[in-house]
Structures are given as structure tokens and as C-alpha cells.
Amino acid sequence: MDERLGQYAEVFKALGDPTRLRILKLLAQRGETCVCEIVPALNMPQSTVSHHLATLKRAGLIAQRKESQMIFYALIDEENTRQAIRFLDRVLEKVEKRTLARAV
């Protein structure tokens, strides 16, 4: 059980950064994608993107495949990641509605 809690913490840590969430969303939309396409899509330095990709990989959320000089990344579990993104979108919509209702 304690080991599982550590794994949960690693996943939540990986999900706790907006850039990493953008990467997950990008991979959910595009499927397997070369890092050479991820860097311009995020408009960030390659070293920064690589750091975030490494964090997601350590958390077990993405896989890496090398083909010649190119490195490709993909979600390990595409369907569950898409469902998690949809879930978060619904949660945020409800939070926004409550916030607006309180402001009125």
C-alpha cells in the first residue's frame, strides 16, 4: 500500500504542471509525436520540453521510441488519458459555474 501511495504521488507530481498537461493533451490529440514537433507546438526551448517529457516518462504516463536520430513520444494508455482530460474539463466547468454563481 505504501509503495502504491508513492506511485500516486509521482503521477500527481507529473500532472501538477501546466506544461506537462499541455504535452499530455497534445499527445492525446495527435498520437505518437516526434519531439521535433512537440517543441515548436509548445514554443519552448528543447531542453525545457525534454525535462518535462522525462518527468512524464518517469511517472509512467508516456513511452519513448527512437528511430534513427528522431525520438517519438506516445501516451502509454491513450484511452484512460483522454478520459482523465475529459474528467478534468468537466470538473473545471463546474468550478467555473459555481464561481460565476457566487459572483452574482
Image (cartoon, rainbow, N blue to C red):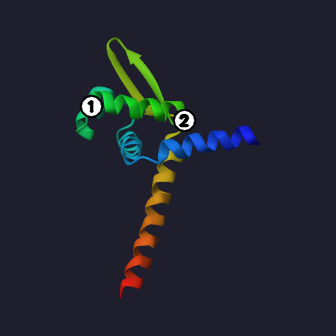
Among numbered discs 1 and 2, the one appearing first in the sequence: 1
Who is closer to the viewer here, 37 or 13?
13
Q: Residue at 43% of width from left, 32% of height from top?
A: 74
**Image mark for residue 16:** none
Query: Which residue is under mark 1?
Result: 37
Question: How far across and down, in percent of the image, does residue 33 sit?
Answer: 35, 31
- Identify which amino acid the numbered label 2 is placed on: Ala
Of labels 1 and 2, the one closer to you: 2
Query: In which quarter of the view is residue 71 placed?
Result: top left
Q: Residue at 40% of width from left, 17% of height from top?
A: 66
Query: Which residue is under mark 2?
Result: 59
- Residue at the outermost right position: 1
Query: In which quarter of the view is residue 44 placed?
Result: top left
- Identify which amino acid the numbered label 1 is placed on: Glu
Q: In this view, does 86 lie above or below 22?
A: below
Instruction: Tell me the crowding category of disc 2: few under 14, some 14 to 19, or many 20 or more residues within 10 angstroms, Cα based.
Output: some
Q: Quadrant of the N terminus?
A: top right
**Horizontal relation, residue 59 to residue 53: left or right:** right
**Horizontal relation, residue 79 to residue 44: left or right:** right
Under circle 2, the secondary element is loop
Q: Residue at 48% of width from left, 65% of height from top?
A: 91
